[in-house]
Amino acid sequence: MFIGIDLGTTSVKTILIDEEGTTWGTVSEPVAVSRPRPGWSEQDPEHWWAAVAKTLDGLKAAHPAAMAAVRGIGLSGHMHGATLLDAQDRVLRPAILWNDGRSADECLDIEASFPEARAVTGNIAMPGFTAPKLAWVRRHEPEIFAQVAKVLLPKDFVRLRLIGDYVSDMSDSAGTYWLDVGRRDWSDALLAATGLDRSHMPRLAEGTEATGRLKPDLAARWGMTTAPVVAGGAGDNAASACGIGAVTPGSAFLSLGTSGVLFVSNARFSPNTAGAVHAFCHALPQTWHQMGVILSATDSLNWLARILDAPAPTLAGALGASVAAPSDVMFLPYLSGERTPWNDAAARGVFVGLSQSTERTALTQAVLEGVGFAFRDCLRVLEEAGTAVTRAFAVGGGSNSPLWLKIMASILNRPLDLGADADVGAALGAARLAMAAALGGDPVRFMPPPAIKATIEPDPALVPAYAEAYERYRALYPLARAAVPAR
């Protein structure tokens, strides 16, 4: 038996599977996000650990015999978060999350101090990454920075509680802006640019490696006969790729979750920073991937639901099973800033085309389409980087909406596949990495793609209309950005 733990932005999901990949149980626990200022996003790391422990307690209560046979645990989590510990492993401040935009100035400082940074990391320095967050703390909270003994990513804080050691995997560490992504090692120059060195970093492991064993007291708590190995694991997107089987060159998935990701697996390090494409290590050895990322995907619909005081499924359901044409209203989904292709933490959301007759159905459709156009931006810059995306698996909470997927497929003019297994995703990918760490051998054999239960084809009648609307969408950002006050 094997366990996959996915530390999501709003919840922890833990899955229990057997060696054939059959799911025995899943348990989820919510975690809260704090937004102390506009553009800021933080969490208490102790809440992560409490939620993880509660999910494992739940699996123990529901499946004691299966839990006794667990041989491996895999970890996944939201990337880029800065978890700061002192010499006694005490948390020094709330973790600064991936969608926090406070460190834009520090990004410029890092690249100015080390001009080769983009070539080494394969990425533009962005406020979402971990290194600029530490530079911000160094500048604005020097008394905290002076106490920092270790910097851990969110899932690696959970690992510390599980095994008592500081370890991170390549895929998650590639999102810190401290990793030499081609060499798969820490960059001393980039660490120095933020006043740190290797002593502040965890040791590095591949996602398929065993990084240690579960502490004996925890193994006893969860009824495990032998303390299982804990795999290196992966950042959430690479873990989702493992869960969907996107581990061979050219395989792709589209994640319609809190954030949005268009992910493509690569055989080699393929940086292209001109369109803010991410080039990261994959969770498997000597494998890399590219991503286009938007920061507010389902979060955009959830925001609208809060504003209109109506559940998101109700809003989407009011549109019916299909749309006849693009909405007269257009929406920029930059509620938490923007990643690909503009790399602008100060960008904000905009509605355009409102009139006295605009109803909430038009707003809802505009939000669904705006997220789709943001994905079209990601597809465009991936293609400009020489990467072909002919189809993709659709995952994430938004993929439960047939209408949203139909809109998305028509905007992208690409078929989107849905897996027959409801558990595909980061937690399953983490469990598969646990299997690879515990059993050894070629890790690809543990990560087959799921059977396809449905394929959402583009609507031929909508494709040209959305292509025209997308060109109007592309013209909006420069106009909207000019109207955003300086911060």
Image (cartoon, helix red, strand yellow):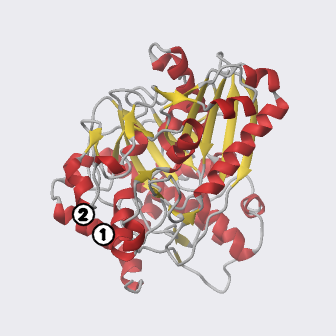
206 sits left or right of 355 in the view: left
**Identity of the residue furthest to the right in this view:** 62
Q: Position of residue 76 (x, y in %)?
A: 54, 40
Marking on residue 110: 2
In the rendered image, the vertical position of residue 461 relative to residue 486, given as above or below: above
Marking on residue 464: none
> In what quadrant of the picture does the C terminus appear?
bottom left
What residue lies at 77% left-to-right and 69% top-to-bottom? 310
Q: Position of residue 355 (x, y in %)?
A: 61, 84
Label pair 1/2, CB-CB below 8 angstroms: yes
What residue lies at 29% left-to-right and 52% top-to-bottom? 123
Distance from disc 1 to disc 2, alpha carbons, whole Å, reads 6 Å
In the rendered image, the vertical position of residue 471 relative to residue 172, given as above or below: below
Q: Quadrant of residue 346?
A: bottom left
User: Could you tell me if residue 10 is visible in this image?
Assistant: no
69 sits left or right of 82 in the view: right
Q: Which amino acid type is marked by label 2?
A: Ile
Can you identify the residue that label 1 sits on? 106
What residue lies at 27% left-to-right and 36% top-to-bottom? 269
106 sits left or right of 300 in the view: left
Q: Position of residue 28 (x, y in %)?
A: 73, 45
> In what quadrant of the picture does the N terminus appear?
top right
